[in-house]
Image: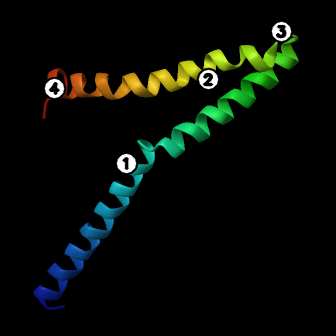
């Protein structure tokens, strides 16, 4: 195979990989993902609280859900700190 065709295919492969990585990163930081996980967390905790016989499972399940959402806000702050002070290339 001629060299220019190999180079072009490699560039296309890298470009496709970069698009996948960008899409994955966008998903990881999206509000859609955070809301879906928060809703699922809420319902799982409600089920657990019902099964455990704990009082007011619908209200008390809000606390762990809010905890999850708060952790998503603070993680970007800690990530920036980690990248700046801990991550060495």
Task: Answer with the quarter of the image where residue 75 lies.
Answer: top left
Residue beneath disc 4: 84
Disc 1 marks which residue?
Answer: 25
Task: Name the residue: 41% across, 52% down.
Answer: 24
Residue 7: percent from left, percent from top: 15, 79
Rendered image quadrant of residue 15: bottom left
**Rounded to the nearest whole Å, what is the CA distance between mark 2 and mark 1?**
23 Å
Residue 16: percent from left, percent from top: 32, 69
- Give the mark nearer the N terminus: 2 vs 3: 3
Mark sitting on residue 54: 3
Crowding near the residue tagged with mark 1, few <14, some 14–19, many ≥20 C-alpha atoms within 10 Å: few
Q: Is mark 3 on a helix, strand or loop?
A: loop
User: What SS does tag 2 mark?
Assistant: helix
Total marks placed: 4
Q: How far across and down, in percent of the image, does residue 41 sit?
A: 66, 29
Instruction: Indicate the quadrant containing the N terminus: top left, top right, bottom left or bottom right.
Output: bottom left
Pointer 3 local density, CA inside 10 Å: few below 14, some 14–19, many at least 20 = few
| Camera-side residue of 19 and 72 | 72
In the rendered view, would you say 68 is above or below 32? Answer: above
Find disc 2 in the rendering and name its residue.
65
Q: Residue at x 53, y 45 (%)?
A: 32
Instruction: Identify the secondary structure beneath mark 1.
Output: helix
Which of discs 2 and 1 lies nearer the camera? The answer is 2
In the rendered image, residue 89, in percent from the top left (x then y), is placed at: 13, 35
Q: Farthest residue in the bottom direction?
A: 2
């Amino acid at each position: 195979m001629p060299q220019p065709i190999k180079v072009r295919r490699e560039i296309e492969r890298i470009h496709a990989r970069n698009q996948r990585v960008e899409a994955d990163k966008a998903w990881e930081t999206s509000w859609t993902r955070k809301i879906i996980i928060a809703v699922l967390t809420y319902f799982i905790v409600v089920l657990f609280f019902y099964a455990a016989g704990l009082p007011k499972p619908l209200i008390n399940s809000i606390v762990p859900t809010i905890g999850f959402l708060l952790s998503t806000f603070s993680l970007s702050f800690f990530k920036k700190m980690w990248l700046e002070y801990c991550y060495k290339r």
